Image (cartoon, rainbow, N blue to C red):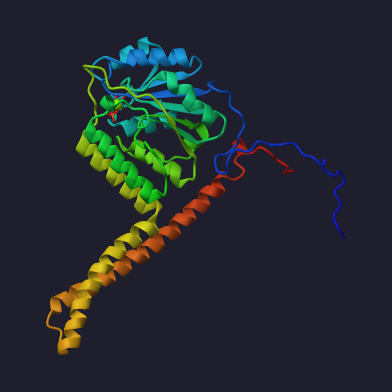
Amino acid sequence: MALRNPTPPDPVGPIVPLGPVGTGSARAWTLRAGTCVLIPCLNEATTIGRLVADFRRDLPQATIVVLDNGSTDGSAEQAAAAGATVLVVPRRGKGHVLRAALDRVRADCYVIVDGDGTYASGDVLKLIDPVARGEAEMVVGARSLLARPDAMRPLHRWGNRIIVNFLNLCFHADLKDILSGYRVLSGETVRRLPLLAPGFEVETELTLECLERDFRILEVPISYRARPDGSRSKLNSFRDGYRIVMTIMALLRDYRPMTFFTALAGVILLAGMLGGLVVVLDFLRTGMVPRLPLAILSSALVLLAAVFLVTGFVVSAINRRFAEMEVLTNRWRSDSIDVDLSR
Ligand SMILES: Nc1nc2c(ncn2[C@@H]2O[C@H](COP(=O)(O)OP(=O)(O)O)[C@@H](O)[C@H]2O)c(=O)[nH]1
Ligand SMILES: [Mg+2]
């Protein structure tokens, strides 16, 4: 017997504005209320007071939180005097302070901006609007499009370019500026990003984790100026550049295991096959194996390649289980249900 619905539904139902899959509820949050501006700051006394004042002017409802890491030049006092809440994090590193802040400050919208005065508060609404409208999970202020040639050292410009191209290639993305220190994320996005990077790698990690979770990243061109005289960058070109590349490799290994391990296995297999070919040719010609060490090395390499290939399969299967768990953890979370028809 067919079940009959006692009250047939309206022919045209209500339109429920659902956010993109995976980002939770689209329950509207009012623009700029529930917004917090996070400013990592290590010895930026020349600029921090002015920057806080600028953001208070351009985002009056937002809470400004300066993340101080034991500055010795009075940055914390200047930030507090300008009206910011100062969060003191003892552990050094831009990544550490950001993580501590994201763990302790819950907001609808996060603006993250460097404290060195190189980014303009006037651009902030351009970055917030797409997130507020639900058009992107993370908006990045992209410098390369409008940066003045003198604002970035040539080494950093090139380093940036190489890293961006490498990352675009590995993660099939088309980004222009992944290392920007000016970005906006929704609260729900932050809730789902498990950041671990201790230092300057945190920006790379933010970008890659968003890509991995299919969050939409929107790049908006912004102005970028050089640090004022008397203010020094904390970035060590080679040490931090190396760490950023290593972060990309580690995330590639963890998030794209099949790509990473197949590539590794491919290179090792090729070396093994080349060595093996020499041994086989020798054997066909003379009926003997005169290069015994090469024969052993080649077979070891081929076996090693097989091990890496299997590792790729195993890690990728484990990843799938975790992805499933994440999906199930988020299902019917009480704060993300828009339509509840259960009894
Ligand atoms: N709290 C904290 N902030 C940091 C640390 N290292 C850098 N910063 C801040 O992060 C921002 C970017 O650093 P900066 O030296 O300008 O790097 P660059 O813009 O890549 O040259 C600045 O506001 C720094 O004050 C740190 O260890 N702790
Ligand atoms: Mg800077």
Taking depth in this image into account, of 91 and 215 the one nearest to the observer is 215
In the rendered structure, the answer to whether residue 34 lies left or right of residue 13 reads left
The quadrant of the picture showing ligand 2 is top left
Residue, x 25% and y 39% (percent of image)?
241
Residue, x 20% and y 87% (percent of image)?
284
Taking depth in this image into account, of 74 and 133 the one nearest to the observer is 133
Percent of width and height locating residue 233:
24, 26
Percent of width and height locating residue 46:
27, 14
Residue 248 seen by the camera: yes
Image height of 200 relative to 118, above or below? below
Q: How many marks?
A: 0
Q: Residue furthest top?
A: 81
Quarter of the image containing the N terminus? bottom right
Percent of width and height locating residue 270:
26, 68
In the rendered structure, the answer to whether residue 181 lies left or right of residue 321 reads left
Taking depth in this image into account, of 60 and 76 the one nearest to the observer is 60
Residue 79 seen by the camera: no
Q: Residue furthest bottom?
A: 287
Q: Residue 101 lies in what quarter of the image?
A: top left
Quarter of the image containing the C terminus? top right
In the rendered structure, the answer to whether residue 226 lies left or right of residue 25 reads left
Percent of width and height locating residue 259:
37, 58
Residue, x 18% and y 79% (percent of image)?
279
